Image (cartoon, rainbow, N blue to C red):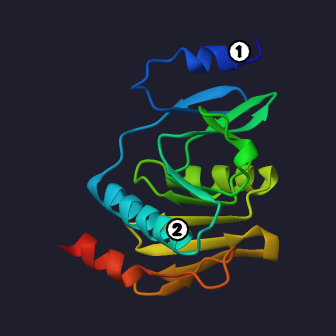
Protein backbone atom coordinates (compact mmCIF):
# COMPACT_ATOMS: atom_id res chain seq x y z
CA UNK A 1 0.00 0.00 0.00
CA UNK A 2 1.48 3.43 -0.92
CA UNK A 3 2.31 5.86 1.87
CA UNK A 4 -0.25 8.55 2.56
CA UNK A 5 0.74 12.02 1.47
CA UNK A 6 0.31 14.75 4.10
CA UNK A 7 -2.48 17.20 3.38
CA UNK A 8 -1.12 20.41 1.92
CA UNK A 9 -1.80 23.50 4.00
CA UNK A 10 -3.45 26.56 2.47
CA UNK A 11 -2.64 30.21 3.16
CA UNK A 12 -5.96 30.49 5.01
CA UNK A 13 -5.05 27.57 7.29
CA UNK A 14 -1.62 29.04 7.90
CA UNK A 15 -3.06 32.44 8.79
CA UNK A 16 -5.50 30.76 11.20
CA UNK A 17 -2.69 29.22 13.29
CA UNK A 18 -2.39 30.60 16.84
CA UNK A 19 -0.28 33.76 16.88
CA UNK A 20 2.29 32.24 19.24
CA UNK A 21 2.85 29.16 17.04
CA UNK A 22 6.02 29.44 14.98
CA UNK A 23 5.92 27.44 11.78
CA UNK A 24 7.23 27.42 8.23
CA UNK A 25 5.75 25.80 5.15
CA UNK A 26 7.76 24.10 2.41
CA UNK A 27 5.83 22.96 -0.65
CA UNK A 28 2.57 22.98 1.31
CA UNK A 29 3.86 20.94 4.29
CA UNK A 30 4.00 22.64 7.68
CA UNK A 31 7.06 22.40 9.95
CA UNK A 32 6.95 23.66 13.54
CA UNK A 33 9.84 25.75 14.82
CA UNK A 34 11.36 25.88 18.30
CA UNK A 35 12.08 29.01 20.29
CA UNK A 36 15.53 30.55 19.78
CA UNK A 37 18.32 30.18 22.35
CA UNK A 38 20.15 32.99 24.14
CA UNK A 39 23.14 32.82 21.76
CA UNK A 40 20.75 32.81 18.79
CA UNK A 41 19.04 35.95 20.12
CA UNK A 42 22.38 37.66 20.82
CA UNK A 43 23.61 37.07 17.28
CA UNK A 44 20.27 38.11 15.79
CA UNK A 45 20.12 41.36 17.75
CA UNK A 46 23.71 42.32 16.93
CA UNK A 47 23.46 41.58 13.21
CA UNK A 48 20.06 43.28 12.89
CA UNK A 49 21.44 46.37 14.62
CA UNK A 50 24.55 46.48 12.41
CA UNK A 51 22.50 46.14 9.22
CA UNK A 52 19.87 48.67 10.28
CA UNK A 53 22.48 51.22 11.43
CA UNK A 54 24.37 50.86 8.14
CA UNK A 55 21.25 51.31 5.99
CA UNK A 56 20.11 54.35 8.01
CA UNK A 57 23.58 55.93 7.83
CA UNK A 58 23.47 55.66 4.01
CA UNK A 59 19.87 56.94 3.88
CA UNK A 60 19.04 53.68 2.12
CA UNK A 61 15.57 52.58 1.18
CA UNK A 62 16.02 48.93 2.23
CA UNK A 63 14.36 47.63 5.39
CA UNK A 64 15.63 45.14 7.97
CA UNK A 65 13.23 42.61 9.48
CA UNK A 66 13.78 39.81 11.98
CA UNK A 67 11.81 36.69 12.88
CA UNK A 68 9.03 36.14 13.24
CA UNK A 69 8.16 37.88 9.96
CA UNK A 70 6.77 35.85 7.08
CA UNK A 71 8.25 35.59 3.62
CA UNK A 72 6.01 33.96 1.03
CA UNK A 73 8.34 32.48 -1.55
CA UNK A 74 5.69 30.61 -3.53
CA UNK A 75 1.89 30.40 -3.78
CA UNK A 76 1.52 26.96 -5.29
CA UNK A 77 2.67 24.89 -3.60
CA UNK A 78 2.66 27.25 -0.65
CA UNK A 79 6.11 28.05 0.74
CA UNK A 80 6.37 30.49 3.67
CA UNK A 81 9.53 30.95 5.71
CA UNK A 82 10.53 33.10 8.67
CA UNK A 83 14.20 34.00 8.20
CA UNK A 84 16.04 35.07 11.33
CA UNK A 85 17.12 38.32 9.64
CA UNK A 86 16.35 39.75 6.22
CA UNK A 87 16.90 42.88 4.18
CA UNK A 88 14.14 43.83 1.73
CA UNK A 89 14.93 46.56 -0.80
CA UNK A 90 11.80 46.36 -2.96
CA UNK A 91 9.02 47.95 -0.91
CA UNK A 92 6.46 46.59 -3.39
CA UNK A 93 7.10 43.13 -1.90
CA UNK A 94 5.82 44.30 1.50
CA UNK A 95 2.06 44.20 2.10
CA UNK A 96 1.86 45.02 5.81
CA UNK A 97 1.70 41.33 6.79
CA UNK A 98 4.67 39.77 5.02
CA UNK A 99 7.26 39.95 2.29
CA UNK A 100 5.92 38.46 -0.95
CA UNK A 101 8.91 37.21 -2.89
CA UNK A 102 12.59 36.90 -2.17
CA UNK A 103 14.33 39.33 0.20
CA UNK A 104 17.66 40.67 -1.03
CA UNK A 105 19.69 39.36 1.91
CA UNK A 106 18.91 36.66 4.48
CA UNK A 107 20.80 35.49 7.55
CA UNK A 108 19.78 32.27 9.27
CA UNK A 109 21.21 31.37 12.68
CA UNK A 110 21.59 27.62 13.03
CA UNK A 111 19.52 25.90 15.69
CA UNK A 112 21.28 22.89 17.25
CA UNK A 113 18.29 20.60 16.71
CA UNK A 114 18.08 21.01 12.94
CA UNK A 115 21.19 22.35 11.19
CA UNK A 116 20.32 20.64 7.87
CA UNK A 117 17.33 22.94 7.58
CA UNK A 118 19.58 26.01 7.14
CA UNK A 119 22.49 24.35 5.31
CA UNK A 120 20.47 22.33 2.81
CA UNK A 121 16.73 22.99 2.62
CA UNK A 122 16.77 26.78 2.97
CA UNK A 123 19.86 27.12 0.79
CA UNK A 124 17.91 25.40 -1.99
CA UNK A 125 14.73 27.42 -1.55
CA UNK A 126 16.47 30.79 -1.15
CA UNK A 127 18.70 30.28 -4.18
CA UNK A 128 15.78 29.21 -6.38
CA UNK A 129 13.52 32.01 -5.13
CA UNK A 130 16.01 34.72 -6.13
CA UNK A 131 17.58 35.76 -2.82
CA UNK A 132 20.72 37.71 -3.73
CA UNK A 133 22.82 36.74 -0.68
CA UNK A 134 22.33 34.18 2.10
CA UNK A 135 24.44 33.78 5.24
CA UNK A 136 24.35 30.91 7.73
CA UNK A 137 25.67 31.86 11.20
CA UNK A 138 26.46 28.77 13.26
CA UNK A 139 27.03 29.55 16.96
CA UNK A 140 28.13 26.00 17.83
CA UNK A 141 30.76 25.79 15.09
CA UNK A 142 31.46 29.54 15.35
CA UNK A 143 31.35 29.92 11.58
CA UNK A 144 29.57 32.09 9.04
CA UNK A 145 28.88 30.55 5.66
CA UNK A 146 28.39 33.09 2.86
CA UNK A 147 26.39 32.34 -0.27
CA UNK A 148 26.37 35.25 -2.69
CA UNK A 149 24.15 33.84 -5.41
CA UNK A 150 24.45 36.90 -7.68
CA UNK A 151 28.20 36.40 -7.87
CA UNK A 152 28.10 32.58 -7.97
CA UNK A 153 30.00 32.49 -4.67
CA UNK A 154 28.80 29.51 -2.65
CA UNK A 155 29.63 28.06 0.76
CA UNK A 156 32.55 30.32 1.70
CA UNK A 157 33.20 29.82 5.42
CA UNK A 158 34.57 32.35 7.88
CA UNK A 159 35.28 31.90 11.56
CA UNK A 160 33.75 34.09 14.26
CA UNK A 161 37.06 35.97 14.53
CA UNK A 162 36.74 37.22 10.92
CA UNK A 163 35.47 40.40 9.35
CA UNK A 164 33.00 39.48 6.61
CA UNK A 165 31.86 41.64 3.69
CA UNK A 166 28.17 41.91 2.90
CA UNK A 167 28.37 41.49 -0.86
CA UNK A 168 25.14 43.28 -1.78
CA UNK A 169 26.73 46.49 -0.43
CA UNK A 170 29.98 48.11 -1.52
CA UNK A 171 31.34 48.99 1.90
CA UNK A 172 29.60 47.01 4.66
CA UNK A 173 31.91 44.80 6.71
CA UNK A 174 30.79 42.90 9.81
CA UNK A 175 33.36 42.08 12.47
CA UNK A 176 32.23 38.78 13.99
CA UNK A 177 34.88 38.90 16.72
CA UNK A 178 32.77 41.62 18.39
CA UNK A 179 29.75 39.30 18.33
CA UNK A 180 31.87 36.35 19.47
CA UNK A 181 32.99 38.30 22.57
CA UNK A 182 29.34 38.78 23.54
CA UNK A 183 28.75 35.03 23.26
CA UNK A 184 31.67 34.32 25.57
CA UNK A 185 30.54 36.72 28.33
Could you tell me residue 58's position as x and y percent?
A: 58, 75
Furthest-front residue in this view: 59
In which quadrant of the rendered image does the N terminus lie? top right
Task: Give the numbered dot on residue 4.
Answer: 1
Label 1 environment density (alpha carbons within 10 Å; few <14, some 14–19, many ≥20): few
Assign a secondary structure to mark 1.
Answer: loop
Residues 152 and 47: in front is 47
Task: Give the numbered dot on residue 56.
Answer: 2
Assign a secondary structure to mark 2.
Answer: helix
Taking the spot 54% from the left edge, 14% from the top edge, the residue there is 16
Task: Judge depth for marks 2 and 1 and give the one in front.
Answer: 2
Taking the spot 62% from the left edge, 73% from the top edge, the residue there is 146
Task: Give the numbered dot on residue 13.
Answer: none
Label 2 environment density (alpha carbons within 10 Å; few <14, some 14–19, many ≥20): few
Instruction: Please tell me whether residue 102 is drawn above or below residue 72 in the rendered image.
Output: below
Taking the spot 49% from the left edge, 87% from the top edge, the residue there is 163
Amino acid sequence: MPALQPALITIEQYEALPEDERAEIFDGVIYNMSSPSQSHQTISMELSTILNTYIKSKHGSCRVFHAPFDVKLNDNPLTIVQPDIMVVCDKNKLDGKRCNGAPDFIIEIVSPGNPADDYIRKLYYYKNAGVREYWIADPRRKTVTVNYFEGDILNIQYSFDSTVKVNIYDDLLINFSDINRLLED
